[in-house]
Amino acid sequence: MVSQFLWVIVPYLSLVLFIAGHIWRYQRDQFGWTSKSSELLEKRQLRLGSLLFHWGILFVFVGHVMGILIPEPFYTALGVTEEMYHVIALAGGIPAGLAAFVGLVILFRRRLTVKRVRATSSTGDWVALGFLLVVIASGLSSTFLNIDSHGFDYRTTIGPWFRGLLTFRPNPAYMETVPLWFQIHILAAFGLFAVWPFTRLVHVFSFPLRYLQRSYVVYRKRMPKQAEPVNRAK
């Protein structure tokens, strides 16, 4: 019963909140659909932290797609052995995870120590940062604890379980042998998805596609006003 709740009900409940929450937010709060940048309040830490976090999380996302959504037989057909895949995953995953984690710590410290940034922070900002810290920290811990090439293989457990969620045929039995750190990582990720629509994280889906259709804005240099001739009486 507990396994059914954690690995079937919780994921679907989180995904429902994720989708319905974005629809509700877009309908009710379009003007708040923004990253609410605090760049004017502090730039140096924001620039470094944001750069590390966004690039790191991008490569982390690609790694998760390659490891969870793509089945193991696909790699076997390409001649990629388990040891080869493990080395590739560690070589790409650890630097990306560390970059995302360090960047997030910088952003968290900035929000905590810069008075003007802290004063403009909302509850949603702290909740989002808290979930992100738990997700990334638990993910890194899972990677370091599973650094042995003969350790836990998530492609034969977490992968099939997650793909089963997407096809509405989840099998919680896959998750019974998953190590604790991986379970914490997954549950924290679903918690993040549940609160996502109600935080500034919605800006991830704000692609400026309309700018591609906008007409050019022509800027003309302001010409100095010519002085009027002065008529001098003789």
Image: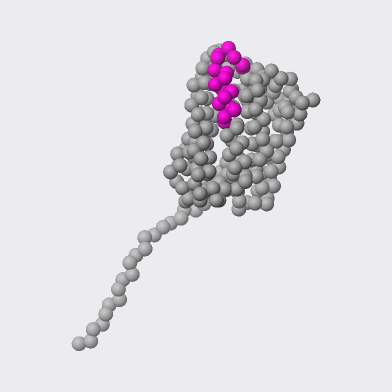
Q: How many marks?
A: 0
**Quadrant assignment for the C terminus:** bottom left
Question: Is the residue 85 above or below the residue 215 in the image?
Answer: above
Q: Position of residue 181 (x, y in %)?
A: 62, 24
- Of all residues shown, which one is farthest toward the right? 1
Question: Is the residue 200 above or below the residue 187 in the image?
Answer: below
- Of all residues shown, which one is farthest toward the bottom? 234
| Residue located 52% across and 21% down the image | 90
Question: Is the residue 76 above or below the residue 31 in the image?
Answer: above
- Which color scheme does this rendered protein use? one colour
Q: Is residue 212 left or right of residue 153?
A: left
Q: Position of residue 165 (x, y in %)?
A: 71, 28
| Residue located 61% across and 51% down the image | 32
* Quarter of the view holding residue 16: top right
Residue 111 part of the magenta-drawn span: no
**Foreground pick, 196 / 223:** 196
| Residue located 47% across and 43% down the image | 46
- Give, as a single range, the part of the protein colored magenta: 136-153
